[in-house]
Amino acid sequence: MKKLTIYCAIFFTFFILLTGQPEVQAEESECTTAIIPGWALPSGRPLMWKSRDVSNWHQEYQYYDLQPYAFIGLNYPFVSYQNECYGGINEAGFAIENSNALNFPDSAGAYDDDGIIMYHALLTCETVDDFLAYMDSTARQGRTNPSNYGVFDAYGGAGILEAAKYTNYWFDASDSLVCPAGYLVRSNFAYNGGTSHVGQYRHDWADTLIRRGMEEGILDARYMFDMVARDLSTETVNPYPLPYSGYVLYQGNYLWGAVRDHNAINRDISMSCFVAEGIASGENPLMTMMWAMTGEPIMTPALPLWMGSYSVPVEMTGDDPDSPMNLRLRELFDYLYYPYPDPYDDVIDTYKLVDGQGGGILVRTREIEESYYDEMVDLTESWRINFPGAAVMTAVQDSLSGYVFDLLYQPEAVDYLQFLPSSANLTMNWPTVFKSFIGDSITVDGYKVYHSGAAYFSSGDSIGFTEDTSFVLPMPGSEGGGFYQVKAVKEWDY
């Protein structure tokens, strides 16, 4: 263990010299995070959450086939960032995330080193103690970007390190006296920093939501990314239930159903998110996993990445320069946010999230997740008992990622139904659907026809499928024909 710690310190110095002082500095980031140690959860497995708040929307997950430890990490797709990482898991069962501690003095003009630190922690650390020893070495050299680092390992270790330029403050979540509530939360201030608390509301509201999940016995990975990371509440506006029955006055316009979310947990700058889940005592460290998002949580289905796969699906990675998933999610961002004064401002249309008629991007996101989440949880449980090997895990990851990516191109609604009667039949006709619900070109796989005795429809009402734009019905009898609906569909099986 001591040899490994020295190895970490040497590598840190090496990569600082290698990276140097680039002309373009990394942008200021914020983030909201939490650590829940295994002892506080029925599963015995720790959880880690990070919503990454930055101005750079180019986000992806990468697999690093390195020694001593391979790892999966959240990063930018550009080559200049290859020796940096902004959170992830490694094959020893170690995980890390961070948020900026803006009330510690910063090193003005110096290149931010938090990504370098997390890269080398994932590369070289097996335990929380390894990480703390490593951070002692970086404190002696001096750090350029003070941060709150959350970590856990495969041995029950967990906590948050508040890292100033030369000083470390450790909060040991594995100690119930230090972590009596069973979780630790941070936004963009250190408890040991100054009185300026950037992100105080996000910190406090995340604390409230996590405590609620704990008290109700429902806190798990899904609760963290669905009920915490996607929350739109701010100090001034509670938009729930969605869609918001109020308005925002902005740029001279009264925008009904819109909210400004820059101060919410789910923010206009929440460019990616993950919830990592560790292992219980005695389990295989390769079962450490992440529920990963390459875009803003409120529009992004969470996908599982298992460390034991030693891979990341092509939809979530790539240097072309962006991952396909990330590009699609940016299109959804532009669809959801009002372009005042440009498409990257913080006014979101909640009627496009939840339209009040059973649709909307958030509704669709949750429906997509519901189609596989429980199955993936059950599959993960079975793999903890009988580890399947990297090939099986990769196949599941890849097919699920492709399935979800395709479903992000949901077709627009079928309009202008026509009924053409004959002596024995009734033929329904409709126009070809060739656009998605946000207006880009797609090719649909066919159409589902629905029938109901009332003017309401659900997935259980389908009476047929056709690849054509017509469907033949029996001629209704004297009892009446009821109501019909047609939906364009893209169908995939994973």
Image (spheres, rainbow, N blue to C red):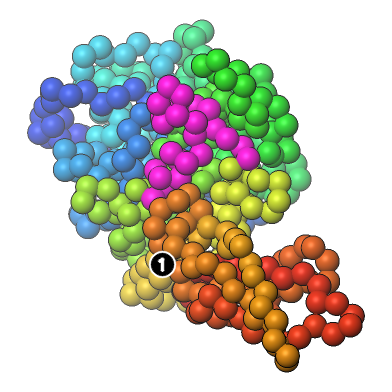
Q: Nearest the camera: 26 or 290?
A: 26
Image coords of residue 288 (percent x, y): 44, 57
- Please tell me whether mark 1 sits on a helix, a strand or a loop: loop
| Residue beneath the point at 54% across and 43% down | 298
Where is mark 1, residue-wise?
A: 443
| Residue beneath the point at 45% across and 35% down | 270
- Tell me the magenta residue range: 328-351
Image coords of residue 261 (percent x, y): 55, 27
Image coords of residue 332 (percent x, y): 45, 45
Question: Is 427 rendered above or below residue 433?
Answer: below
| Residue beneath the point at 68% across and 38% down | 243
Few, some or many C-alpha atoms within 10 Å of disc 1 (few <14, some 14-19, many ≥20)?
A: some
Image coords of residue 241 (percent x, y): 73, 38
Q: Nearest the camera: 319 or 162?
A: 319
* Residue 93 colored in magenta in the image: no
| Residue 57 relative to residue 172: left or right | left
Q: Nearest the camera: 311 or 354?
A: 354
